[in-house]
Image (cartoon, grey):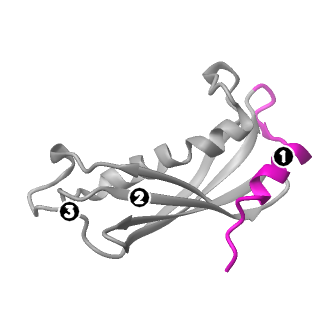
Amino acid sequence: MFTDTFDVRFYETDALKHVSNTVLVGWFESARIPIFKVFNPTLDLDNWPLILASYKVDFLQQIYLGYPVTVKTWISRLGNSSFDVYQELHQQEEVKASGITTLVHFDYVSQKSAPISEEVRAVLLSHLRET
């Protein structure tokens, strides 16, 4: 499991006095950086090996200004060239949201998916979420 903590910033709140729903997608993406580094340690955008296939976010409780949030990130499925990332957003020891993102190991030259190497697969499996 990977973890990352963010402070809620004032501008991330909305007229209803809680964090806007659009902010969570950004937090989840930022918390996936350790996974990106498994594929591309320097985060070289000229040699980017992943493409986003889909994401889904479930909003479970409201999130408020004044308390940090922690995103916990696991691998929940590992295929030949694609994998799912399961994430939970916690605030004050409670799960406030969860999400699943499907990423594909992608060759931008051929415009096709590419198999995940055994070396990368081993690292991803070490972060597998047990259900």
Identify which amino acid the numbered label 1 is placed on. Answer: Ile
Identify which amino acid the numbered label 2 is placed on. Answer: Thr
Quadrant placement of the N terminus: bottom right
Residue 121, placed above or below residue 48 = below
**Residue at the farthest bottom position:** 131
The number of numbered badges drawn on the structure is 3
Residue at mark 2? 70
Residue 13 position in % (x across, y down): 17, 53
Q: Secondary structure at mark 2?
A: strand
Residue drawn at 62 percent across, 27 percent down: 43
Q: Which residues are magenta?
A: 109-131
Residue drawn at 81 percent across, 59 percent down: 79
Q: Say if the magenta span includes residue 122.
A: yes
Give the crowd class for mark 2: few <14, some 14-19, many >=20 residues within 10 Å: many
Q: Earlier in the sequence, mark 2 or mark 1?
A: 2
Q: Earlier in the sequence, mark 2 or mark 3?
A: 3
Q: Earlier in the sequence, mark 3 or mark 1?
A: 3
Residue at mark 1? 116
Q: Quadrant of residue 89?
A: bottom left
Give the crowd class for mark 1: few <14, some 14-19, many >=20 residues within 10 Å: many
Q: Is residue 60 left or right of residue 30?
A: left
User: Mark 3 and 1 residues: CB-CB less than 8 Å, in contact?
Assistant: no
- Please give the label number shown on residue 64: 3
Q: Quadrant of residue 49?
A: top right
Q: Secondary structure at mark 1?
A: loop
- Distance between the Cα atoms at labels 2 and 1? 28 Å
**Residue at the farthest top position:** 46
Quadrant placement of the C terminus: bottom right
